[in-house]
Amino acid sequence: MATLPEPDRRPAAAHGTTGAPDSHVTVPPAIIARAQAGDAEAFELLYRATAGRVYALCLRLTADRVEAADLMQDTFVRVWKQLPAFRGESALGTWIHRIAVTGLLERRRSATRREARIETRGDLEVIGGRARPEPLDSRLDLETAMARLGETARRVFVLHDMEGYDYAEIHELTGLSEVALRSQLHRARRKLMTVLEP
C-alpha cells in the first residue's frame, strides 16, 4: 500500500462536519469499487475524504493525540485489508468508524490482559500506561473535559451523543448491556456538566 498523506487533524467541527456516523462525506461508488479492487490511487482518495473524521473520532475515544494517530493508522490498514468485503450495507463512514471502535476495544482488551499478568508484590505495573491528565483550568472545552471521563463512560458518550449510534449498535460494539450503557452515559453526562459548569 502506498504511503498515505497526513490527514486534516482539525476537529470535525472546524471543517463543517459533525462526526455523526451518517457522514456528510460521500465517496463516489466508482472510487470505492476501484479501491476494493486494489487501486492505491482510489484508496488515497477514499482516505483523504474520510481521514479527518476518523482522526476526530479516534481523538475523542482516546483523549490522546499520539494514541489517536496510531489508532487511525491501524484503522486505515484494516480498511485497506477489509475493503474488498465492504458490501455497502451501511455508509462507508459508518463502516470505517466501526473498524476504529473495534480496533480500540481490541487494544484495551489486550492491554487489560497484559496488565493482569504483570502483578508484582500486590502492585500492578502498567506497561505502556499513560499518566492521568493534569488538573485542568476553569476554561475547559468539551474535548478536554471528556479526557477526564473514565474510559468506558467516554467511549459510550462519544458513540451515543457525538457519533449518533443507538444502544443496540453500541451493545454490538462493546458487549455492554443497555442498562450498563445507560448508566455509563448518565455518569458521563453528569461528570461533564459538573466539570463544564462555570
Image (cartoon, helix red, strand yellow):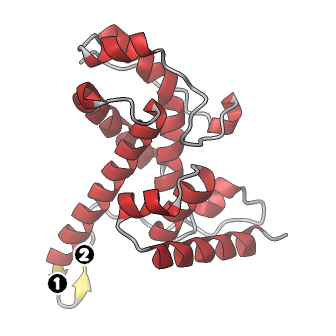
- Between discs 1 and 2, the one toward the N terminus: 1
Q: Amino acid at mark 2?
A: Glu
Rendered image: mark on residue 125:
2
Contact (CB < 8 A) between labels 1 and 2?
A: yes
Mark 2 Cα within 10 Å, few/some/many (few <14, many 20+)? some
- The image position of residue 122, as x and y in percent, is 21, 91
Q: Describe residue 83's horizontal placement relative to residue 195 as left or right.
A: left
Residue occupied by mark 1: 120
State which quarter of the image contains the N terminus: top left
Judged from this view, the residue extending furthest toward the right is: 198
Q: Secondary structure at mark 2?
A: loop
Marks counted in the figure total 2
Rendered image: mark on residue 36:
none
- The image position of residue 77, as x and y in percent, is 27, 32
Decide: is 95 above or below 6.
Answer: below
- The image position of residue 46, as x and y in percent, is 42, 20
Q: Describe residue 112's horizontal placement relative to residue 56 as left or right.
A: left
Decide: is 21 above or below 61.
Answer: above
Judged from this view, the residue extending furthest toward the front is: 89
Q: CA distance from mark 1 to mark 2?
A: 7 Å
Q: Pick whichever, 111 or 177, lies toward us.
A: 177
Decide: is 102 above or below 182.
Answer: above
Judged from this view, the residue extending furthest toward the bottom is: 122
State which quarter of the image contains the C terminus: bottom right
Q: Amino acid at mark 1?
A: Thr
Quarter of the rendering containing residue 161: bottom right
